Amino acid sequence: MLGTTTWAIPEGYIPVGSTGPEPELESHETVCLLNAGDETAAVEITIYFADREPAGPYEVTVPARRTRHVRFDELDEPEPIPRGTDYASVIEADVPIVCQHTRLDSRQAENALLSTMAAPIE
């Protein structure tokens, strides 16, 4: 099976400002979830902060043999993730998945894009 059931992204930050058209060029972070298996994945995302208790879990599903890109700035239940605040995330799924982390920082007209694999936890 491709992937694992627990992933960590220790670095998180949604920039406050943006330039360019929204929503495409609005500053944001995304977790890209790949479910290459034969069963739908039930995924929970928990957000950790430096100065308060964690938020979540945020619940999403990824159908079998599909990908889903989840923008952190669009997660609002149980609460929105604040912009301009350091955070980390733990992604847990009931079947193996693969996770990648991406940030678009468009505070300047010269946009910056960062993408890295999340850390698989075995």
Image (cartoon, rainbow, N blue to C red):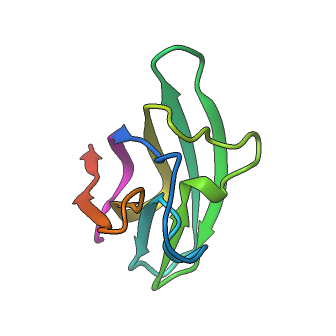
Number of callouts? 0
Q: Quadrant of the N terminus?
A: bottom left
* Left-right relation of 34 to 79: left
Comparing 40 with 75, the one in front is: 75
Find residue 23 and report its image quarter. Answer: bottom right
Find residue 113 and report its image quarter. Answer: bottom left
Identity of the residue drawn at 23% across and 59% down? 116
Residue farthest to the top, as pictured: 51
Q: Tell me residue 31's x, y (percent).
A: 44, 60
**Residue stretch in magenta:** 1-10
Q: Magenta includes 52?
A: no
Residue farthest to the front, as pictured: 109
Residue farthest to the bottom, as pictured: 65
* Left-right relation of 26 to 60: left
Q: Tell me residue 114's x, y (percent).
A: 26, 60
Identity of the residue drawn at 36% across and 47% down? 7
Identity of the residue drawn at 25% across and 47% down? 119
Secondary structure mostly seen in magenta is strand
Where 61 falls versus 65 (above or below)? Answer: above
Comparing 94 with 80, the one in front is: 80
Find residue 42 and report its image quarter. Answer: bottom right
Where 116 falls versus 2 (above or below)? Answer: above
Q: Tell me residue 41's x, y (percent).
A: 55, 67
Identity of the residue drawn at 28% across and 52% down? 118
Q: Quadrant of the C terminus?
A: top left
